[in-house]
Amino acid sequence: MAESNKVIAQLKPEDFRKVGIDEKDAEVIQRESLSAWQDAWQRLRQNKMAMTAMIIMILIVIMAIVAPHLVPYTYDSNDLMSTNKPPSSDHWFGTDDFGRDVFVRTWMGARISLIVGLAAALIDLIIGIIYGGIMGFFGGRIDTVMNKFSEILYSIPYLLVVIMLLVVLEPSLGTIILALTITGWINMSWIVRGEIMQLKNREFILASRSMGAGWKRLLFRHLLPNAMGPIIVTVTLSVPSAIFSEAFLSFLGLGVQAPVASLGSMISDSLTGWMYYPWRMLAPAIVISLTMLSFNIFGDGLRDALDPKLKK
Amino acid sequence: MFRYVINRFFHMVISLFVLISATFFLMKAIPGDPFTAEKKIPEQILQRLYAQYNLDKPVFEQYGIYLKNILQGDLGISMKMLNQDVSHIIGQTFSASLKLGVVAIIVAILVGITLGMLAALHHRKLIDNVAMVLAVLGIAVPSFVVASLLQYLLAYHWKIFPVMGFNGPMNYFLPVMALTASPIAVIARLTRSSMLEVLHADYIKTAKAKGLSWGSIVFRHVLRNGIMPVVTYVGPMTANIITGSVVIEQIFGIGGIGKQFVQAINTRDYPIIMGITIFYGVILMVARFLTDVAYVAIDPRIKLTQRKED
């Protein structure tokens, strides 16, 4: 203490220099300006789990496109001389009870499952945005009636509706997607409605309105782009649930019909003898689990990245 | 509160009505009738049969009769199993499914809450990480994959549990494990996140400052407030376990409603499909109704905001 006091006592006025304030400094941009999307991407990139999930997702999609061309078999070419063969250099994942190559069928199955998942999610998205957009934007009586209607539809158990429809319509890729979306869009419409209701009272909407913007401009230029975060997360998470529903339907014999395979139908076909031929189940089971796992983890990561407020 | 219950109740009745009507008209949309067979039935006998089952009346009259019968618990007769009442078939197979379902629900709630609680109390430690990895796996891996794996490893390979059947207590383990994998995962995640929130609340600090014991803080303050979200999940969980049981009963050879349902779908036995659909629908909607009511009844904070909405 005493030491530092001595130092201070020795200081002379000449030792001081006027620094002043350079007002330009305050305006200097220290860091590149980032849009909300770039910001979210930076956060996502730091999330190792989500990035791993994303890489696995991309790999599965690439394999579903490319893999069937890597081997000299097609998904329905059977060889009755080599049925139920374990994995070998000829058949990487073995063969099934018709002597079909499990490797090709697994990736063709992944292709079908992904098509079902993505198509169902996309249709849910379109209907959900339109329906939810109208509910949220117009509000009032329109909202009450439309919301009641969707609530009643929603309280009918989802899979029962899907099963009933597929029992009546013959199962095919188209009817499965139709059945999965018949009440699947409701959840999305509620997300959109909630977001828009919340956003439409904000100042920037008032500003745009006072400058004479019509409802189209308000909805498509201001409301929807700002609601995009939760919408994207919901889409990502609805893909695995559609894939699961399709697998469940395959189990009931209401999935895609043979010889076409989905991951679900391969697993359900392999059940009868799977203690003796485990490879017939293992390959599709691992691929379907990895697909669902990676979509779920990526969706969760996306949610954290897009809405940092949520994360604690 | 009373208004809310009445409101929910009407909601449930309307939804049920929509489901029943939808099943009826969908089934009417299928070409052919129960007496379309390879063997030609003489015209007169056919007319008699139609008259007996009211198939000669206009569709809307049939619809009225159908609704009346359902209200009396009559779901029609099977098309493939001669002279078998659908209600009778459901009654026969229900007990196995009910036992399995009730055990599964209890196990899911107990294990799920315990797991979530442990994870929350050891936030970011080993238990937390292990529990959350298990939770993600439970949600992502389909129940039939879990079931087949368990069957292969625990029953076929290590011979700890019986492979199939539903006769004794040992038969419960594998189906219950497979059925509860995903509900446990969801409940654990819900409990964990809501308990983490509660742990930071001011009243927990107060409780600690008062010098309450650890056990009393965790069980009387944290857990009671933390399991609120789990209550909302009971409805969806019932749906999850019922649809899951359709597949699980098939895999483990349990003679419940689910197995009957799959069989009916494979043989296109429409009255049974319709009957079981309606039966499942009633259970699920009642479960959802009770969940909604229970949530409002348990949580005093909800009442005020809810009343404003209605």
Image (spheres, helix red, strand yellow):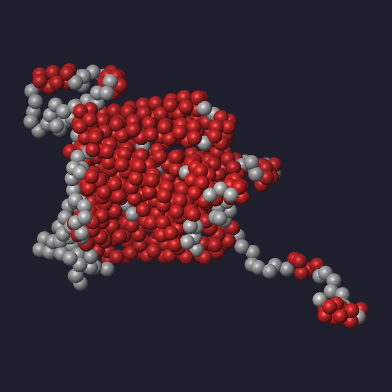
Residue A249, horizontal then vertical, whole percent = 28, 45
Residue A305 drawn above or below residue A208: below
Query: Would residue A225 be found to the left or right of residue A184 on screen?
Result: right
Residue B93, picture quadrant: top left
Camera-side residue: A146 or A97?
Answer: A97
Q: Is residue A104 visible to us here?
A: no
Residue A75, horizontal then vertical, whole percent = 22, 59
Residue A167, horizontal then vertical, whole percent = 26, 38
Could you tell me which residue is drawn at 26 percent across and 49 percent down? Answer: B173
Name the outermost residue toward the right: A13
Could you tell me which residue is drawn at 36 percent across and 35 percent down? Answer: B284
Camera-side residue: A48 or B173?
Answer: B173
Residue B283, horizontal then vertical, whole percent = 34, 33
Query: Would residue A190 be found to the left or right of residue B111 on screen?
Result: right
Could you tell me which residue is drawn at 14 percent across and 32 percent down? Answer: B81
Quadrant where the C terminus of chain A sits is bottom right
Q: Is residue A68 visible to us here?
A: yes
Camera-side residue: B192 or B24?
Answer: B192
Residue B207 drawn above or below residue A43: above
Quadrant where the N terminus of chain A sits is bottom right
